[in-house]
Image (spheres, rainbow, N blue to C red):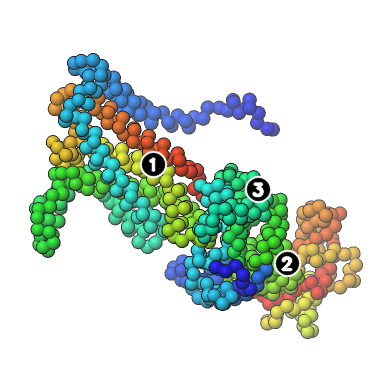
Amino acid sequence: MPASADTLARTPFDRSLLLVVPAAAFMLLLFVYPFLYGLALSFNPKEGGALANYSHFFTTDNLWPTIWITLKLALPATLINVAFALPIAYKMRVKTRYQRWVTMILVVPITLGTVLIAEGMLLYFGPRGWLSQTLQFLHLYEGPIRLTHNYWGVLISLVISGFPFAFLLILSYVTGIDPVLARAAATLGADPKAQFRHIYLPLLAPGLAMCFCLAFVQAFSVFPSAVLLGSPAGPTRVISIAAYEAAFEQYDYSLASAIAMIMGFVQLIIVAAVLSLRNVFYRGPVSGGKG
Amino acid sequence: MKHDFSELRLDRVTRRFAGAGGKAFNALDELTLTVKRGEFIALLGPSGCGKSTALNCIAGLMQLSGGTIHLDETRIDTLPPEKRGFGMVFQNYALFPHMSVEKNVGFGLRMRDVPAAEIASRVEKALKLVQLVGQAQKLPGQLSGGQQQRVAIARAIVIEPPLILMDEPLSNLDAKLRIETRAEIRRIHRELDRATIYVTHDQDEALSLADRIVVMKDGVVQQIAAPPEVYAQPANLHVARFMGYRNVLELAVASGDGDRVALSGPDISITGVRKQPLSGGRAAVAIRPEEIVVTDDRAAGNTIAGRVDNVEYSGRDALLDVVTASGTLLHVRGAVTIRRGDHVHVRVPPERALVYPLD
């Protein structure tokens, strides 16, 4: 008997949908509620009108530049991570004896916390660190090497902690593309370079955009390494430090909430810009036809 | 790559793979074959017989472990696929999902830096050839399986390759579409006047399409011959089984007189034609179901008596399972009037009972 629209409409409630409830409750309690609470709080400043916190942020000299300082760290770090992860992941798409080992070694830093990375970097890159001593011992570079407590220290740590993430994400996109497409392109006269340019790259573009967004959001909220490896009073005074100071040094939760809102808004703008760029590209199944 | 050629020569082409436990095996073992311009060659065999390996070796997607491939005087087995310029149609079509039909078909021409105006006209011509005019702007995902297959064919032929390679191109289509597209492929082959190498596991496809069939098993060529010969005179028992000789009976050799051999079992005694030298006292006789005749004439000779155990109606006739007293099963085509349980006599024409050594 053919199923009419009627019988379809009376399909019993699928109880497995209830499995969503814990996750939804979790989101509501631990994300949506605090977010809305913070949003409301940001419009209730200690003194002044509803927008006092925001006007304070954009008129205070040690607050508004934190946006640029954070962007100057997060954007290059994200670009470096995605740009290096792409060719390596592309090479790793073919199963070889070494593939598993290389992948493992590249992914190890993901298991290290940012604090551990920072500690290691202080020892290794510091003025009396191994790198500096080795270079001086070999008479390659005599002057002091400044790779910690400044911009570069934070950037390097963002690359170390962010690269494995970008690499794993891109690797999964690359291996998801049917290799027979590249073979088909080869029989049509495409050399390996053209195969990458005309087949892999366009099919990867949406994934790369996604990866960029996730890596960027991660880098933009940099905090521990900016404190431990940077100079949190100056060149690496990122926006999260400003929020932290407002909340836990000035005990101005309202201002801290406003800064957090601004931080989220900046992230949203970048993500929206990148994702709208993504719509330019093809976004569909990446196989070459019926299974 | 020049488009005019007279022949493609495969000389002892071999491909070795590392198998389980580090034991290497030959997926393709010394394939020697000359393909002339205009020829349609089918590589036929069960899965794992090495036919796709052979095709990939010719296309350049797999390196040879031994042997050479020449296109006329040019040695090509050392060239990468993009330098060989053969058109290939893949089993799952391998259309570029992010390109329109037009872009897919024009891809090979763009890689060759053909001027845009010429690309447009050649793509249009190719789409006309596969009857897909009006679909040029669609993405592959918007087409049916049959249409996708024709895009894949158009994409392979638009570069005017000397050789078109097809890897089971019809296996993803339904039965009706398969027969239509089969005719289409034969027509396109005729119109292009190049050479086609076609891999399939379906003997009907091979028989209907090919000028010559290469039957393979375990990487080794079993027989290279025109379809009627492969059909009627299989070179060995394996080819016979594969070509639809469903009855393979193991019997004792009673006597041999030239090519005629008399064989006997507990309740079977028939004469057949020897196709290969026999050794030992036993041999296998291979017979097609449709070449066995149900008869009333018990004295006709070369008959076997049995009871009908199962009837499969197939329209024009029926496929009968006939079981002899000692339990030997015979597949026989017979009239639809025969019922299960009937006792029948079946006659095997001696010239159509092919005798092979046991394998």
Residue A141 sits above or below residue B352 on the image: above
Asked which secondary structure carries label 2, the reply is loop
- Looking at the rendered structure, which numbered label has been put on residue A176? none
Q: Name the residue under label 1.
A: A210
Q: What percent of the width, then of the height, locates residue B104?
A: 55, 52
**In the drawing, does residue A53 fall left or right of residue B332?**
left
Q: Which residue sits at x=27%, y=45%?
A: A77
Task: Out of A209 and B54, give the one closest to the viewer.
Answer: A209
What amino acid is labelled 3 in the image?
A: Val
Do we see residue B250 in this rendering? no
Mark 2–mark 3 Cα distance, whole angstroms, equals: 43 Å
In the picture, residue A245 is in which quadrant?
Answer: top left
Do we see residue A238 in this rendering? yes
Please tell me which of labels 2 and 3 falls first in the chain: 3
Q: What percent of the width, then of the height, locates residue B9?
A: 59, 75
What amino acid is labelled 2 in the image?
A: Tyr
Residue B105 sits above or below residue B282 on the image: above
Q: Mark 2 points at which residue?
A: B245
What amino acid is labelled 1 in the image?
A: Met
Q: Which of marks 2 and 3 is in front?
A: 3
Q: Mark 3 lies on which chain?
A: B
